[in-house]
Image (spheres, helix red, strand yellow):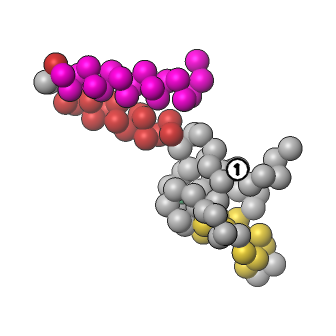
Amino acid sequence: MKIEDAIIVLKESVTILSRANGKTILKDAIDIAIEALEKQIAKKPRENSRKVIAGIDGANCGLCGGLIFNPSKYCNRCGQKLIWGNEE
Ligand SMILES: [Zn+2]
């Protein structure tokens, strides 16, 4: 199962739990799991945010806007997985 498919299944289970009107602790846990999984889907830096800082290729995280440096695989601030376009 791909991460994207797991997110869809978890989101649907939250909808079912909401309809059942209960299990809020489980719903909270599923929401946290979805957020963590979504960060594992690599995101590009914010558009037009690439810049050289002290000779290092940097940019802003596509999720939180924090400063990130190429070739970091994850944002130090929010944990978002990164894709720079130079991976291949
Ligand atoms: Zn971030």
Q: Which quadrant, please, contains the C terminus?
A: top right
Q: From the image, tell me which residue sits under label 1.
A: 83
Compare residues 52 and 47 and report the one nearer the observer.
47
Residue pictured at 37% horizontal, 28% vertical: 11
Asked if the stretch drawn in magenta spans residue 7, the answer is yes
Q: Main secondary structure of the magenta part?
A: helix
Relative to 88, 14 lies left or right: left
Residue pictured at 32% horizontal, 32% vertical: 29
Q: Looking at the rendering, which quadrant does residue 13 occupy?
A: top left
Specify start and end residues of the magenta stretch as a single range.
1-19
Asked if the stretch drawn in magenta spans residue 8, the answer is yes
For residue 28, above or below residue 68: above
For residue 47, above or below residue 88: below
The x and y percentages for residue 25 are 22, 30
The x and y percentages for residue 86 are 83, 52
Residue pictured at 54% horizontal, 29% vertical: 4
The x and y percentages for residue 41 are 59, 40
Q: Is residue 76 visible?
A: no
- Quadrant of ligand 1 in image: bottom right
Q: Which quadrant, please, contains the N terminus?
A: top right
Q: Hey, which residue is sitting farthest right in the picture? A: 88
Q: Which amino acid does label 1 sit on?
A: Ile
Residue pictured at 19% horizontal, 30% vertical: 24
Compare residues 54 and 14 and report the one nearer the observer.
14
Disc 1, SS: loop
The x and y percentages for residue 50 are 71, 70
The residue carrying pointer 1 sits among few (fewer than 14), some (14 to 19) or many (20 or more) residues within 10 Å by Cα, namely: some
Relative to 29, 79 lies left or right: right
Relative to 64, 51 lies left or right: right
For residue 9, above or below residue 43: above
